[in-house]
Amino acid sequence: MIKKNIQRIIQYRMCLLRFQNLGFERIFSYTLAQEIGVSPEQVRKDFSQFHLRGNKKAGYLIQDILDQINELLHKEDIHKIIMAGLGNIGKALIQYKGFAKRNMQLVAGFDINPAKLKKNCRIPAFHPDKIPEVVKKEQVRIGIIAVPEQAAQEVCNIMVDAGIKGILNFAPVILKAPSDVVVQNISVCAELEALIYVTRKNEEK
Amino acid sequence: MIKKNIQRIIQYRMCLLRFQNLGFERIFSYTLAQEIGVSPEQVRKDFSQFHLRGNKKAGYLIQDILDQINELLHKEDIHKIIMAGLGNIGKALIQYKGFAKRNMQLVAGFDINPAKLKKNCRIPAFHPDKIPEVVKKEQVRIGIIAVPEQAAQEVCNIMVDAGIKGILNFAPVILKAPSDVVVQNISVCAELEALIYVTRKNEEK
DNA sequence: ATCTTTTTGTTTAATAATTAACGAATTAAT
DNA sequence: ATTAATTCGTTAATTATTAAACAAAAAGAT
């Protein structure tokens, strides 16, 4: 559903920031490619598709490309996110410091037992009933679902009705949502199972 | 790197188990497809490629397909996994109950400060220096990296040298590893950024 | 027993994604 | 100023993935 090229653009950005911090001003498709683990042609093609241009012989100006990627990804404004489920994963993500510097902000957590979130936490916690209210008030478009399997679809429905347009789902179910809502799944178990399969297969060779 | 069809097989398995628990004995490609969000042709093709066969007109026998998928994924034996990094994500995953019923077992956690893991936890924690020892002793092939960005490559190297063949990486860096080691990345930030991009794009339409 | 309906399984077609190829531009050197 | 060496950017070719089409098999109805 989500195009691969935009996923790589996001990776390029991460990598370019690192190179910039290291003091570099320019970078070649070859260097970036090696760092990300793709071919230089892939980098040039991706850049080309998003109209990110470099200088022949002199490569790409890091700051320039970063500016354009930031604009592409709307990095200029802060993106508010809500989190449903305050179990292990939910709490771990709420404590994660990395969102802020990427201009993403977790504005609220939701759980049938909102007290799960300690009072000293900067982020307020509510019952899932309050999702519509918060979404409307804070103009939230992105939600994370980290509730148990059985509750996931229900929470999804609430989010969709509230106006959420993108969902990152950690529950091991495929959520049903209207086509204008994008659902992206993360399943640690499935990833591990896939890893187990391929490593076993590699061994057989 | 990891083929899409095997990833779907893992999803089908999850879904088949659910249907079995609901009391069903048979299932049609159409039903399964709808549940996973793919076309029935895709299901049949995937099944065909892994020699999972059904009955024309009577669909697929759930138990039969599950048995074969389990064999394919080596679900008969327990797969040991180690976890590097006992921060928010690391601890959350260690507390996760879902691994056991999928025949996966987290055998040890590692951190430069192993005391991060409470004593009452069933899983022992060590300094990363001990990775080779544990990997050898327990015959571990899969490792999870949930350490900060700066330490990720170093931990990766230790794991690779110790004989780990598959790595699930939560750190926001692309790890360099030999071609016989499979690295799979999970980046919550990147997924969110991609979601933000596509939802914005959908809005423009 | 034959016909109809349904659903699989394979083959063929279409689309998407990646890789390769190569001309054009830019810099540096002679 | 001309030549050589790089590196981008686009077009073409390949490969991978998904969708469509349809024959064959099985079940049920007549």
Image (cartoon, coloured by chain):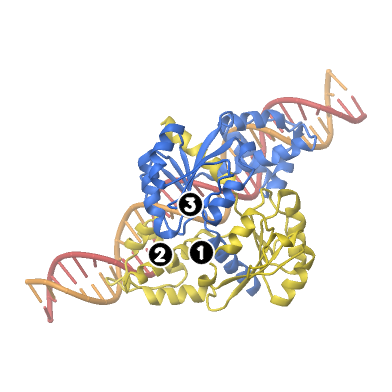
Chain colours: A yellow, B blue, C orange, D red
Q: Nearer the viewer, residue C30 or A26?
A: A26
Three-letter amino acid code of the residue under disc 2: Cys
Q: Earlier in the sequence, mark 1 or mark 2?
A: 1
Q: Crowdedness of circle 3 by 10 Å Cα count: few (<14), some, many (20+)?
A: many
Above or below, B84 relative to B52: below
Q: Which residue is mark 1?
A: A6
Above or below, A181 relative to B84: below
**Which chain does tag 1 point to?**
A
Residue occupying the point 60% across, 43% down: B8
Q: Nearer the viewer, residue D25 or B117?
A: B117
Measured Cα–Cα span from mark 3 to mark 2? 22 Å
- Give the SS element for disc 3: loop
Residue A28 position, x and y percent, is 32, 66
Residue A163 can be seen, yes or no: yes
Above or below, B106 relative to A144: above
Q: Which residue is mark 2?
A: A15
Q: Which residue is mark 3?
A: B85
Residue A185 position, x and y percent, is 62, 54
| Marks 1 and 3 share the same chain | no
Rendered image quadrant of residue D8: bottom left
Residue A184 can be seen, yes or no: no
Picture quarter with the N terminus of chain A: bottom right
